[in-house]
Protein backbone atom coordinates (compact mmCIF):
# COMPACT_ATOMS: atom_id res chain seq x y z
CA UNK A 1 0.00 0.00 0.00
CA UNK A 2 1.26 3.45 -0.90
CA UNK A 3 2.34 5.89 1.76
CA UNK A 4 -0.13 8.77 1.25
CA UNK A 5 1.96 11.29 3.22
CA UNK A 6 5.07 10.53 1.20
CA UNK A 7 3.07 10.80 -2.04
CA UNK A 8 1.67 14.17 -0.94
CA UNK A 9 5.14 15.49 -0.11
CA UNK A 10 6.40 14.30 -3.51
CA UNK A 11 3.53 15.98 -5.35
CA UNK A 12 4.07 19.23 -3.41
CA UNK A 13 7.79 19.27 -4.20
CA UNK A 14 7.02 18.50 -7.86
CA UNK A 15 4.56 21.40 -7.99
CA UNK A 16 6.91 23.99 -6.50
CA UNK A 17 8.33 24.82 -9.94
CA UNK A 18 4.83 25.47 -11.31
CA UNK A 19 3.72 27.60 -8.35
CA UNK A 20 6.91 29.67 -8.53
CA UNK A 21 6.70 30.12 -12.28
CA UNK A 22 3.01 31.09 -12.23
CA UNK A 23 3.65 33.55 -9.39
CA UNK A 24 6.51 35.13 -11.35
CA UNK A 25 4.33 35.51 -14.47
CA UNK A 26 1.52 37.18 -12.51
CA UNK A 27 3.65 39.32 -10.22
CA UNK A 28 5.64 40.85 -13.10
CA UNK A 29 2.62 41.22 -15.40
CA UNK A 30 1.88 44.60 -16.98
CA UNK A 31 -1.58 45.23 -18.52
CA UNK A 32 -0.33 47.14 -21.53
CA UNK A 33 2.78 45.16 -22.52
CA UNK A 34 2.46 41.94 -20.59
CA UNK A 35 5.74 42.62 -18.86
CA UNK A 36 8.96 40.61 -19.05
CA UNK A 37 7.07 37.34 -19.52
CA UNK A 38 5.62 38.50 -22.83
CA UNK A 39 8.95 40.08 -23.82
CA UNK A 40 10.57 36.65 -23.41
CA UNK A 41 7.68 34.70 -24.95
CA UNK A 42 6.93 36.88 -28.00
CA UNK A 43 10.02 36.13 -30.13
CA UNK A 44 9.75 32.40 -29.42
CA UNK A 45 6.04 32.33 -30.24
CA UNK A 46 6.57 34.45 -33.37
CA UNK A 47 9.25 32.04 -34.53
CA UNK A 48 7.05 29.01 -33.85
CA UNK A 49 4.10 30.52 -35.72
CA UNK A 50 6.42 31.35 -38.63
CA UNK A 51 7.74 27.79 -38.78
CA UNK A 52 4.21 26.36 -38.73
CA UNK A 53 3.22 28.65 -41.59
CA UNK A 54 6.37 27.89 -43.61
CA UNK A 55 6.10 24.11 -43.17
CA UNK A 56 2.33 23.67 -43.46
CA UNK A 57 0.98 26.81 -45.08
CA UNK A 58 -1.36 27.21 -42.11
CA UNK A 59 -1.54 30.59 -40.43
CA UNK A 60 -2.47 30.37 -36.76
CA UNK A 61 -4.44 33.57 -36.08
CA UNK A 62 -2.91 34.83 -32.85
CA UNK A 63 -2.59 38.60 -32.78
CA UNK A 64 0.39 40.03 -30.85
CA UNK A 65 -2.06 42.12 -28.82
CA UNK A 66 -3.39 38.82 -27.45
CA UNK A 67 0.02 37.69 -26.13
CA UNK A 68 -0.52 39.17 -22.63
CA UNK A 69 -3.82 37.26 -22.37
CA UNK A 70 -2.07 34.11 -23.54
CA UNK A 71 0.55 34.55 -20.82
CA UNK A 72 -2.10 34.99 -18.11
CA UNK A 73 -4.00 31.97 -19.42
CA UNK A 74 -0.79 29.93 -19.21
CA UNK A 75 -0.16 31.13 -15.64
CA UNK A 76 -3.70 30.21 -14.55
CA UNK A 77 -3.48 26.78 -16.21
CA UNK A 78 -0.09 26.23 -14.58
CA UNK A 79 -1.15 27.28 -11.06
CA UNK A 80 -4.57 25.62 -11.21
CA UNK A 81 -3.10 22.40 -12.59
CA UNK A 82 -0.37 22.35 -9.95
CA UNK A 83 -2.86 22.95 -7.14
CA UNK A 84 -5.15 20.14 -8.30
CA UNK A 85 -2.20 17.82 -8.93
CA UNK A 86 -0.87 18.49 -5.43
CA UNK A 87 -4.32 17.62 -4.06
CA UNK A 88 -4.20 14.31 -6.01
CA UNK A 89 -7.00 15.29 -8.38
CA UNK A 90 -6.38 13.74 -11.79
CA UNK A 91 -7.60 16.76 -13.76
CA UNK A 92 -4.58 18.64 -12.39
CA UNK A 93 -2.33 16.28 -14.34
CA UNK A 94 -4.33 17.01 -17.50
CA UNK A 95 -4.03 20.78 -16.93
CA UNK A 96 -0.28 20.46 -16.39
CA UNK A 97 0.06 18.53 -19.65
CA UNK A 98 -2.02 21.15 -21.49
CA UNK A 99 0.43 23.73 -20.15
CA UNK A 100 3.72 21.83 -20.50
CA UNK A 101 3.49 20.28 -23.96
CA UNK A 102 3.19 23.51 -25.97
CA UNK A 103 5.54 25.41 -23.64
CA UNK A 104 8.21 22.73 -24.06
CA UNK A 105 8.06 22.78 -27.87
CA UNK A 106 7.67 26.55 -28.31
CA UNK A 107 9.86 27.99 -25.56
CA UNK A 108 12.71 25.44 -25.50
CA UNK A 109 13.37 24.94 -29.22
CA UNK A 110 17.08 24.10 -28.87
CA UNK A 111 17.18 22.83 -32.47
CA UNK A 112 16.78 26.42 -33.71
CA UNK A 113 19.71 27.81 -31.71
CA UNK A 114 23.26 28.18 -33.04
CA UNK A 115 24.96 24.77 -33.00
CA UNK A 116 27.13 24.10 -29.95
CA UNK A 117 26.26 27.48 -28.42
CA UNK A 118 25.62 28.00 -24.73
CA UNK A 119 22.00 28.97 -25.56
CA UNK A 120 21.48 25.71 -27.45
CA UNK A 121 22.87 23.77 -24.50
CA UNK A 122 20.67 25.60 -21.99
CA UNK A 123 17.52 25.19 -24.10
CA UNK A 124 18.25 21.49 -24.55
CA UNK A 125 18.53 21.09 -20.78
CA UNK A 126 15.19 22.89 -20.27
CA UNK A 127 13.59 20.85 -23.05
CA UNK A 128 14.75 17.54 -21.55
CA UNK A 129 13.76 18.67 -18.02
CA UNK A 130 10.25 19.48 -19.25
CA UNK A 131 10.10 16.22 -21.19
CA UNK A 132 10.97 14.28 -18.03
CA UNK A 133 8.31 16.20 -16.09
CA UNK A 134 5.76 15.39 -18.81
CA UNK A 135 6.79 11.74 -18.41
CA UNK A 136 6.33 11.95 -14.64
CA UNK A 137 2.82 13.39 -15.06
CA UNK A 138 1.91 10.65 -17.56
CA UNK A 139 3.30 8.07 -15.11
CA UNK A 140 1.14 9.57 -12.36
CA UNK A 141 -1.93 9.38 -14.60
CA UNK A 142 -1.24 5.71 -15.31
CA UNK A 143 -0.47 4.50 -11.81
CA UNK A 144 -1.98 6.89 -9.30
CA UNK A 145 -5.23 6.26 -7.56
CA UNK A 146 -5.82 10.02 -7.77
CA UNK A 147 -9.41 11.06 -7.59
CA UNK A 148 -11.67 12.94 -9.90
CA UNK A 149 -13.58 15.99 -8.71
CA UNK A 150 -16.80 13.93 -8.77
CA UNK A 151 -15.25 11.21 -6.55
CA UNK A 152 -14.15 13.86 -4.02
CA UNK A 153 -17.65 15.37 -4.02
CA UNK A 154 -19.19 11.95 -3.27
CA UNK A 155 -16.75 11.37 -0.41
CA UNK A 156 -17.62 14.77 1.05
CA UNK A 157 -21.36 14.05 0.83
CA UNK A 158 -20.86 10.77 2.73
CA UNK A 159 -19.25 12.67 5.60
CA UNK A 160 -22.34 14.81 6.14
Image: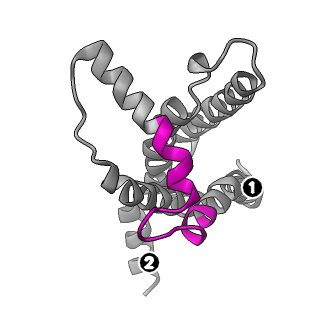
Q: Is residue 10 left or right of residue 89?
A: right
State which quarter of the image contains the C terminus: bottom left
Q: Secondary structure at mark 2?
A: helix
Question: Which label sits on residue 63?
Answer: none
Q: Tell me where residue 106 appears, x and y as whole percent.
A: 49, 33
Instruction: Name the main secondary structure of what is drawn in magenta.
Output: helix
Q: Is residue 72 part of the magenta span, yes or no?
A: no
Question: Which label sits on residue 13?
Answer: 1
Q: Secondary structure at mark 1?
A: helix
- Which residues make up the magenta segment? 23-44
Task: Select label 1 or label 2 by which is in front.
Answer: 1
Q: Is residue 157 left or right of residue 129?
A: left
Q: Tell me where residue 141 appears, x and y as whole percent.
A: 51, 40
Q: CA distance from mark 1 to mark 2?
A: 26 Å
Classed neighbour count for the residue bearing mark 2: other residues with Cα under 10 Å, few (<14), some (14–19), many (≥20): few
Q: Is residue 67 left or right of residue 43?
A: left
Indicate whether 56 appears above or below 47: above
- Its colouring scheme is one colour
Q: Are marks 1 and 2 in contact (CB under 8 Å)?
A: no
Residue at x 72% of width, y 27% of height: 119
Residue at x 45% of width, y 54% of height: 74
Residue under label 2, please give it. 156
Taking depth in this image into account, of 132 and 139 the one nearest to the observer is 132
Amino acid sequence: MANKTLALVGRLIFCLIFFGSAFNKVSTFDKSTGGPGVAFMAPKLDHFLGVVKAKTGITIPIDKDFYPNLLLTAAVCEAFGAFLFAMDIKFGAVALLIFMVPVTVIMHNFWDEAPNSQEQHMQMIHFLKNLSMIGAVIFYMGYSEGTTVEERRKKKEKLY
